[in-house]
Image (cartoon, rainbow, N blue to C red):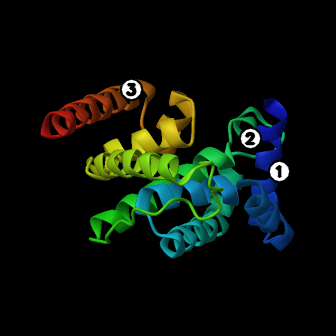
Amino acid sequence: MAAPMADDAALAARLAARDAQALREVIARHAGALNRIAYRMVGDAHEAEDIVQEACLRLWDHAPRLAQRHPAGTPAGAALRLSGWLKRVVTNLAIDRLRAGRRISGEEVPERADEAPLADSRIEVEQRDGATRALVLALPERQRAAIVLTYYEELPNAEAAEAMDMNIKAFESLLHRARASLRQAFAAQGEAQ
């Protein structure tokens, strides 16, 4: 794991030196995951793309400070994780967009393939997924972010906590509350049917 982190410090130094190829490398490595997080948070492909672009621009702008704080070839440089930094920025930008009052779409991630073999199975899956998505979207923004990062992006709790700029205990508490809220919502939905 030390090699990718050291590589991140070297990338940050290249970004600080305004190496456009370094930015292309960062985008090639991280854009897919960042887009999935943003899309699942805001529910709109165009908004998600804008969020990822904004995160990459922020990395470009903050690269000199990151490179100074985490010099390549040092223990501080080995601690730099661009993926965690970018995920935190994307998560915060998505929360900001949600708080600005944007509506959330119920669509699936555009690049996701249809896995249902039959129409009746597909309808059943879509109804269940739609109900689940609606319950997740009804959660408060930070709880929603915890669910998206943990279950949709399958990030370990430590990485998800880093993406949300939280310590691990606070993140686990937030995730526990989010799960409890979802359980209550599922139970209430089952009773209503």
User: From the image, which quarter does the C terminus lie in?
Assistant: top left
Q: Which is nearer the eye, 70 or 110?
A: 110
User: From the image, which quarter does the N terminus lie in?
Assistant: top right
Residue at disc 2, secondary structure: helix
Q: Earlier in the sequence, mark 3 or mark 2?
A: 2
How many numbered marks are there?
3
* Residue occupying image coordinates x 46% and y 63%: 107
In this picture, is 45 found above or below 150? Answer: below
Q: Which is nearer the eye, 32 or 60?
A: 32
> Which tag is nearer the camera, tag 3 or tag 2?
3
Residue type at mark 3: give it.
Glu
Residue named by callout 2: 77
Marks 1 and 3, how far apart in space?
32 Å
Question: Can the viewer see residue 15 in this picture?
Answer: yes
Q: Earlier in the sequence, mark 1 or mark 2?
A: 1
Residue at disc 1, secondary structure: helix
Residue at disc 3, secondary structure: helix
Mark 1: few, some, or many residues within 10 Å (few <14, many ≥20)? many
Q: Position of residue 115 (x, y in %)?
A: 63, 49
Left or right: residue 104 compared with residue 189: right
Residue named by callout 1: 10
Q: Are marks 1 and 2 in contact (CB under 8 Å)?
A: yes
> Which tag is nearer the camera, tag 1 or tag 3?
3
Q: Which is nearer the eye, 133 or 36?
A: 133
Q: Are marks 3 and 2 in contact (CB under 8 Å)?
A: no
Q: Earlier in the sequence, mark 1 or mark 3?
A: 1
Q: Position of residue 72 (x, y in %)?
A: 81, 45
Query: Which label number is shown at residue 172?
Result: 3
Residue type at mark 1: give it.
Ala
In this picture, is 90 found above or below 172? Answer: below
Residue type at mark 2: give it.
Gly
Q: Position of residue 88 (x, y in %)?
A: 51, 50
